[in-house]
């Protein structure tokens, strides 16, 4: 059979069964024919449109602290990065970001930060309750790293709806390559399982092209995501960050990221799938391309302009223009150009 027939059959099978034998997944990952990416994007968009129509959900991202006790080798706000200007927003500043976001049509606020011990359960729970009582029609998503099950339960009981914790890699030896000795693959996975069991809408994910990542690692990622059945999946290209051990490594491939977005959409038709800031940073029209590949979420930045540059996860991270929440109108127009519309909606995981 000609190669194009082989990959077309694999895509059709993935759409139908939401799964594939490993060799078929590997075939799709390793084939570089642009016609495959185009076919994947076409099928993924059709599947996404069946569940979500042309609606794109927006999430207001509030990067509320760049203090971090961890030292992940890839991350520009790792503890050892001494050139980072550290900041921490207070509750009042965070509520003011939510107010700005609400007026712009945001109905989900994502609180993301480094693992900052200042934000203990008591402070975080008080913040969550304050946001939920001021904006009862909004969802609160947390992305603050690894915590104990008891802590996650308290955050959930305080009203948090969703939690994003990328697993980063499902291959234990690759995990070791990306993290220092005190961080453990098993802990990361335990956290994700706890979050699901507690009842959070849970997001996992990984960087595409992180140093040492092989096709086999990505196959394990897909298998892990399949076993977790998350409501959200966040993937974006790895982008080197100055001052980190990986500062001279290559950037991850945008085209592989786009293929993976399409494959994940076909595996999990109802999943909430962002076209990430990293993809928008790697490619000028990365977020539009992400939507056309099957994504249905965009997370503009709602942090105060004065701190945006300080949340420097990687070099040249977007923080103005369409990336900024103030420019929702601009974003709306750029989505309309490709046939989609930004909606004012919490955008929960759809029930069957
Ligand atoms: N501290 C929390 C955690 O670890 O989940 C949330 C913040 S962390 C900075 C958010 C995500 O940024 C990570 O899960 C990682 O995948 C991504 N990230 C960090 N450094 C990156 C880089 N150099 N390129 C692309 N993404 C990166």
Image (tube, rainbow, N blue to C red):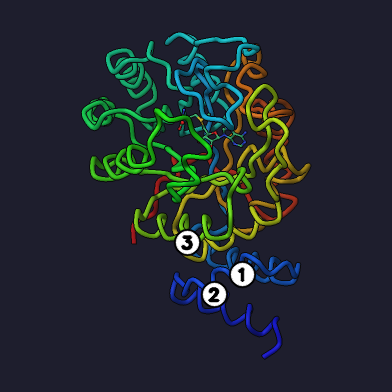
* Residue 138 visible in the current orientation: no
For label 3, being within 8 Å of ligand 1 is answered: no
From the viewer's perspective, is 12 left or right of 239?
left
Question: Pointer 1: what residue?
Answer: 28
Q: Mark 2 or mark 3, which is nearer the start of the sequence?
A: 2
Query: Measured along the vertical axis of the image, is residue 34 above or below residue 298?
Result: below
* Residue 208 visible in the current orientation: yes
From the viewer's side, name the closer residue of 304 and 192: 192
Secondary structure state at the residue bearing disc 1: helix
Residue at screen point 73% across, 33% down: 248
Question: Pointer 3: what residue?
Answer: 51
Quadrant of the frame with the N terminus: bottom right
Which percent across, then down, holds residue 258? Answer: 65, 55
Q: Residues within 10 Å of mark 3 (few under 14, many from 20)?
A: some
Question: Pointer 2: what residue?
Answer: 24
Q: Which image quadrant is residue 8 in? A: bottom right
Residue at screen point 44% across, 43% down: 167
Residue at screen point 74% across, 71% down: 35
The answer to whether the residues at label 1 and label 3 have Cβ atoms under 8 Å apart is no
Which percent across, then down, holds residue 319? Answer: 69, 26
Rounded to the nearest whole Å, what is the CA distance between mark 3 and mark 2?
Answer: 26 Å
Q: Which mark is residue 236?
A: none
Between tags 3 and 2, which lies in front?
A: 2
State the residue lying farthest toward the right.
284
Rounded to the nearest whole Å, what is the CA distance between mark 1 and mark 3?
Answer: 24 Å
Between tags 1 and 3, which lies in front?
A: 1
From the viewer's side, name the closer residue of 343 and 226: 226
């Amino acid at each position: 059979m000609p190669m194009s027939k082989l990959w077309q059959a694999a895509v059709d099978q993935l759409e139908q069964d939401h799964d594939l034998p490993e060799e078929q997944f590997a075939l799709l990952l390793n084939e570089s024919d642009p016609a495959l990416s185009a076919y994947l994007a076409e099928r993924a968009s059709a599947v996404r449109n069946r569940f979500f129509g042309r609606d794109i959900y927006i999430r207001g991202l509030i990067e509320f602290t760049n203090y971090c006790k961890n030292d992940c080798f890839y991350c520009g706000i790792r503890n050892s990065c001494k050139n980072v200007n550290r900041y921490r927003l207070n509750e009042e500043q965070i509520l003011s970001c939510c107010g700005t976001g609400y007026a712009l049509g945001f109905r989900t606020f994502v609180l993301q930060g480094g693992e900052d011990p200042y934000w203990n359960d008591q402070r975080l729970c008080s913040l969550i309750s304050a946001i939920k009582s001021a904006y009862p029609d909004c969802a609160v998503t947390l992305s603050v790293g690894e915590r104990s099950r008891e802590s996650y339960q308290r955050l959930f009981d305080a009203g948090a709806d969703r939690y994003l914790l990328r697993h980063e890699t499902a291959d234990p030896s690759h995990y070791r390559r990306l993290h220092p000795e005190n961080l453990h693959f098993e802990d990361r996975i335990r956290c994700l399982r706890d979050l699901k069991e507690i009842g959070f809408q849970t997001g996992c994910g990984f960087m595409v092209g992180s140093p040492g990542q092989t096709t086999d690692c990505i196959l394990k990622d897909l298998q892990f995501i399949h076993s977790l059945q998350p409501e959200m999946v966040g993937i974006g290209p790895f982008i080197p960050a100055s001052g980190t051990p990986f500062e001279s490594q290559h950037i991850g491939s945008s085209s592989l990221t786009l293929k993976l977005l399409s494959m994940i959409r076909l595996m999990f038709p109802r999943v909430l799938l962002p076209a990430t800031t990293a993809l928008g940073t790697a490619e000028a029209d990365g977020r539009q391309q992400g939507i056309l590949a099957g994504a249905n979420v965009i997370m503009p930045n709602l942090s105060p302009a004065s701190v945006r540059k300080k949340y420097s996860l990687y070099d040249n991270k977007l923080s103005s223009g369409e990336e900024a929440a103030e420019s929702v109108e601009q974003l709306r127009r750029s989505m309309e150009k490709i046939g989609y519309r930004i909606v004012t909606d919490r955008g929960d995981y759809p029930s069957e």
